[in-house]
Image (cartoon, grey):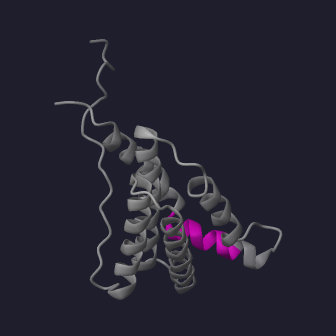
Amino acid sequence: MTFDPLSAAGAAIDITLQQIFNPARIARIIQYNERDKSNPSIGEFFKTYFKTLFEQEMSQGLAGEIQRLVQSRSVDLLIQLEQNDDSPLYVKTWAHNTLAIWKEWFADQAYEITDETAQRRHYIYMQVKIDDYFKNPKEYKPADAVTIPPGSPIGCYGY
């Protein structure tokens, strides 16, 4: 069995992103801003998130694959946030509107890249993924999170 760096990265990504896309956390950000406009809005928070994770120059090789994995899981978790029964209506509407904005951004990016590259294919796939969800939200099932394998990490017992 060989080490799969993308699965390891995927597990770490999911641990982090599930906290960011937690329905209660998103609801609190929205509520805190509604109570006091000096608190950051959900729009400001995710504008920074988007710029950091989507608008940066894409790396090549394995690092680029990890960046695409973060983007893909972000879309999946945003869809799950809208589908989640625990999400208040205002969180669901925010998630839906954000997906629509992201879909247009992916479409624009794919259009600007004329070469057939992994990045262009990724942008098209993200656009199609969101579009498929919008066409049939009740039937759409986002990808499951990568699970961390059981047991201690190799080498933790001095072997």
Residue most toward the top?
158
Q: Is residue 152 magenta?
A: no
Q: Is residue 45 shown to the viewer in this render? A: yes
| Identity of the residue furthest to the left in this view | 1
Up/down of 79 relative to 148, above or below: below
The structure residue drawn at horizontal position 56% and vertical position 58%, both measured from the top left corner, is 54
Q: Residue at x 30, y 64 (%)?
A: 143
Rendered residue at 51%/43% (across/down): 59
Please name the residue shown 83% across and 69% down the image: 38
The front one of 22 and 120 is 120
Secondary structure predominantly adopted by residues drawn in magenta: helix
Where is residue 12? Give x, y as percent.
42, 44
x and y percentages locating residue 137 in the rendered image: 35, 84
Judged left or right of residue 65, residue 89 is right
**Picture quadrant where residue 124 is located:** bottom left
- Quarter that holds the N terminus: top left
- Magenta stretch in the rendered image: 21-31
Let me know if residue 85 appears in the view: no
Image quarter where the C terminus lies is top left
**Residue 47 location, x and y as percent?**
66, 65
Q: Considering depth in this image, is 11 or 36 the residue closer to the camera?
A: 11
How far across and how far down the image is residue 62, in percent?
A: 40, 39
Residue placed most toward the observer, 92 or 63:
63
